[in-house]
Image (cartoon, coloured by chain):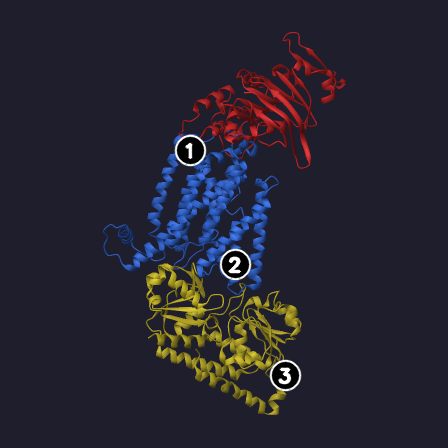
Chain colours: A red, B blue, C yellow
Amino acid sequence: MSILAKDVTWGVGERAIIQDITLDCPEGTVTGLLGPNGSGKTSLLHVMAGLRRPRGGVVELAGADVHRMPARDRARRIALLEQHASTTLPLTARHVVDLGRIPHRGRWPAGRGEGAVEITEAMRLAAVTHLADRDWRTLSGGERQRVQLARALAQRPSVLMLDEPTNHLDLAHQIDLLATVRELGLTVVAALHDLDLAAAFCDLLVVLRGGRVVTAGPPAEVLTERLVRDVYRVEATVGKHERSGRLHVVWHDERAVR
Amino acid sequence: MLQTVHPARTRPGAGFATGAVLTALLLGSVVVAVGIGSVHVPAGDVIDVVRGRLGLPAEGVTVIDDRIVWQLRMPRVVGAAATGAGLAIAGAVLQSLTRNDLADPYLLGVSGGATVGAVSVIVLGVSVAGLVGGAALGAGAFVGALVALALVLMLATGRAGDLPPARTVLAGVAIGQLCAAYTSFVVMISGDHDSARRVLAWTMGSLAGVRWQSATILLVVALGALVGIIAYAADLDAFAFGDASASSLGVSIQRVRWLLMVGTALLTACLVAYTGAIGFVGLVVPHVVRLVAGPLHRRLLPLSALAGAVLLIWADTAARSLLDGQEVPIGVVTAVFGAPLFAFLLRRESRSR
Amino acid sequence: MTSSRRTRFLPALLALPLALTACGGAPEAESKEAGGDHYPVEPTSCGFTSTISAPPERAVTMNQGATEVMLSLGLEDSMAGTAYLDDAVPEKWRAAYDSVEVLSKEYPDNETLLKAEPDFVYGSYASAFGDEAAGPQDELEKLGIGSFLSLFGCDENQPSADVSFDSVWKEIEVVADVFDVEDRAEALQDEQEKVLEELAESRPGDGLEVFWYDSGDRTAFAGAGEGGPQLVLEAVGATNLFADLEGGWADVSWERVVAADPDVIVLADASWSTAEDKIAMLEKDPVLKDLRAVKAEAYVVLPFSETTPGVRLADGAVSLGKQLAELG
């Protein structure tokens, strides 16, 4: 399903944290949200995922207003992977992934087998099958992130919202994660900080600064030296890598010379 | 060396096995506890009394034995089971909703408010709906609990009408302190020689006044609460990683939190009105059950209810038979066993992290 | 409930020594003013000794027990104030009580007490000499104010006297000594002994098993084996259901009450727990309403102040004896 945000504004108290945000993510595309810290990426993801009600504007999922949907229906279609997840409870990784089936289950404890297939599949895709019986609290940052991804996948969503999903991951796992979600054909909106990864895996890039959209479009159009300078305040060269043909950003700073 | 969770917790059958054991323990406890008390009634006579009451043929049942076993002890045992179950469930729910391991059923000002109500009846002689004696005390306690709950909720409600966990806990502490101040003030200024002792006795809790009427009400309330709350087992699980996570899993966090907090507060207020504020059960039982059967609520809730019931049956049995002819306040018994148990749990938890 | 004969008799008895002192010779009065050979008197209790060098003329009593000891010795003219009444002072002393100023409903604070310019402070419970009340006895001593704490009122640091009539009379003797009216104490003791002897002979409570219900609703706070209730019951020859428990009172088990099915229930009547309320509770309770004593309404009611160790215990015994006889 496609998801779009039209003139979305949201804030706390007097302050507006995001303003007049419009972005259109066609079905099956991967959209990268870029921008420095504090630019409103997490807030935008939360509003689009239906967790927060916008003050102005609307979020539509295949034409239906996300904030008018019953919460469970929404949760069956949109899954959110947060930046930080923590708990003090002694949950196993499997328990955590099992949480993803909650939107699909009735109120009364269902038959024990419900969702077994989805859970197994989700754990395989996130490469956490071997962690199933481990206590979540003993896992490394990266392992936790992938277990949470499995949980999101177990929801069998059409839209996946990812908030800095690659933060704790090794390079190999970072690539795996983005490749996997892309292959699944889900509509993905991901807040990313790694420009090279964004360039490699996203169909669309949206750049935020100060709660507003600075620019949006395909990576080749958006990732310019000027943008990197204006938004990230770093001097860089953007070019195509000879072997892979992918865009990559190389920053310059004398202090890095050895 | 990274730890594996004890496989028992994750085995699908573990919940049922533990449940079966606890149920057997509960039934066994009822049977044994009704035979223990400050007056010695031989086991055979106890059995005869019960048989007689159940309509089975029984011989030689004296009126006094029947009164003691069936009219005094049995309702206490039933009442203790219901109260223990209710307190344990309430504790489990509040610990999950506030994500605070130290939450107990009295979090929302219920115990403080109930004491205010009780003190007003005991010391100031405030009358409630023309009731006297124990009934007035219970009614006063219930009303006091409701007022305190309302104050806590007012204080805790955020701008958006939600109940942020941290703020709720603090509001509970604040109102609790206010209630304690009122209680002390009334006892010291308006109280007579006996007031302090009687108020203390009330706060320590007792099942000595529970007869069949009260026991039945307690049982209905506890069972109703259990059934009602189990319906929210999945929602409670969803709170494991916090509000955003729960919301993304489709839980209407505001509605669920309000419903469950008010619901458990009402449950607790009912229990407290009959038996006073018995401590430690609601705090410790959910932790022990979590250790054995894991944190998922479809197991945690019913198993906590069973464990709480068993625990309080034995605490009450101890309270009424430890000292010959004398009653020990049940709050003392639960504290004496609860405090070291809790310390043990804390050490275990900190070692496993 | 007190014997009307005694009501008329006692003041006459007490008036006698007073009359004697009044028309007594100058020598006696002189020796008093000069300090005489009776003073200094050093009343001791709970590990504290006070020094009294002359008969106090402005005594303040801090509890009902203390007030009643003073009134029973006819010392109202030596009193400047009373405080903390639990229930009504009996008829026989009513006029005397009314002639003394009531300083406060409960304990007076330091200032109120000092304003009354006391030279002697007498309390029944250790709390009377707490900081918010009269203040510690040694502080009072420094201000030249003598004091005395009941032998039964010592706090945890000092053991209180055993509860017995002898101890009651000992205390009255000590207080009488302070005011140099020992003969009145003797007379009082004689009288009480006589009354107790009569009861010991007639034994109105013989063979009766009694449940002494002081207060409490869920659990009963009942008379135990070592206090006022036990003494009073023993004086009439009755058996206390909970005589085996330590202390004056205890929270007791209803099971034992039901098992024993006592003959009589004694109810202490206090403003915080009236006999009426207790009876209502007993009659409403599904189990207790079937007790023999409840069905037959075999109740004895005693005012609370006749059940605590003090000068009125004997009155309590007499009243109990009478009511038991009436119950037949």
Measuring from the top left, give residue C297's x and y in whole percent: 36, 69
User: Which SS class for mark 3?
Assistant: loop
Q: Chain of mark 3?
A: C
User: Which SS class for mark 2?
Assistant: helix
Residue B4 in sight in this render? no
Relative to B8, residue A199 above or below: above
Residue B97: which numbered mark, if any? none
Residue A109: which numbered mark, if any? 1
Q: Residues within 10 Å of mark 1 (few under 14, many from 20)?
A: some
Q: Is residue B12 left or right of residue B350?
A: left
> Disc 1 versus disc 3: distance between alpha carbons?
92 Å
Residue B88 in sight in this render? yes
Labelled pair 1, 2 in contact (Cβ < 8 Å): no
Labelled pair 2, 3 in contact (Cβ < 8 Å): no
> Disc 2 versus disc 3: distance between alpha carbons?
52 Å
Q: Residues within 10 Å of mark 3 (few under 14, many from 20)?
A: some
Tell us which disc is closer to us: 1 or 2.
Answer: 1
Residue C35: which numbered mark, if any? 3
Q: Chain of mark 1?
A: A
Which of A62/C266 is in front? A62
Question: Of the residues shown, which amino acid type is indicated by label 2?
Answer: Val
Relative to C16, residue C134 above or below: above
Q: Residues within 10 Å of mark 2 (few under 14, many from 20)?
A: many
Residue hosting label 2: B119
Question: Of the residues shown, which amino acid type is indicated by label 1?
Answer: Pro
Tell us which disc is closer to us: 2 or 3.
Answer: 2
Q: Residue at the location (56% across, 53% down)?
A: B179
